[in-house]
Image: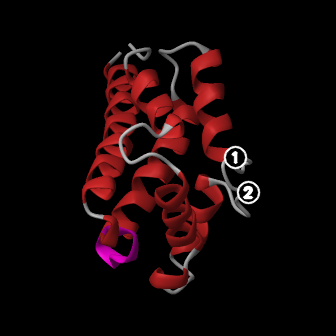
Amino acid sequence: MVDTLMEKISLKKDLHLIYEDWQKLIKNNSLSSDEQFLSRMSEHIKKLHDHTLQDKTNSEQITQLIRYLLDTTLGAPFVSEQSFYQASLNYSSQEPKTSDLHKLLSQMIKFSPKIDNQFMKMFHSLESCVN
């Protein structure tokens, strides 16, 4: 029972952390080049992906939707070469300022309204859907 509760809390926490990361980024766009910020965000994305695979307390539809968002490349308003999850996996083997994660976040900042990024709003909305 304790393991199940821990997974549930972790999934909710990781969704919240990614949304918080985005909020920090829109307030300070230079964070997309900050090595510590990128490393932390990369870890949050990987943990969220891992927790969706381990989670036993939420519906499979919710965990599949989260993985879909993490595993799918973006097609609008720009086409991304990597998914968030793949960019996070690649991050540790790349130069931070030219990493896939840096490029993806920079493009999101460039092409998305500062406050109303639909992709990040999905993570925030899903936070209320997990138990």
Residue 33 is covered by the magenta coloring: yes
For the residues bearing labels 2 and 1, Cβ distance under 8 angstroms: yes
**x, y (%) of residue 55?**
51, 26
Mark 1 residue type: Ala
Instruction: Please state the total of marks drawn on the protein image.
Output: 2
The answer to which quarter of the image holds residue 54 is top right
The relative height of residue 7 versus residue 91 in the rendered view (above or below) is above
Identify which residue, 3 or 95, lies in the foreground. 95
The answer to which quarter of the image holds residue 82 is bottom right
Task: Name the residue located 45 percent from the left edge and 61 percent from the top edge.
Answer: 42
The relative height of residue 50 versus residue 12 in the rendered view (above or below) is below
- Residue 79 - label: 2
Tell me: 104 left or right of 10. Answer: right
- Residue 90 - label: none
Circle 1 is placed at which residue position?
Answer: 76
Mark 2 residue type: Val
Q: Which residues are magenta?
A: 31-36
Q: CA distance from mark 2 to mark 1?
A: 6 Å
Tell me: 13 left or right of 70. Answer: left
**x, y (%) of residue 58?**
50, 15
Tell me: 62 left or right of 1. Answer: right
Task: Name the residue located 33 percent from the left edge and 76 percent from the top edge.
Answer: 34
Task: Name the residue located 74 percent from the left edge and 64 percent from the top edge.
Answer: 81
Q: Dot 1: within a 10 Å radius of its alpha carbon, few (fewer than 14), some, or many (20 or more) residues?
A: few
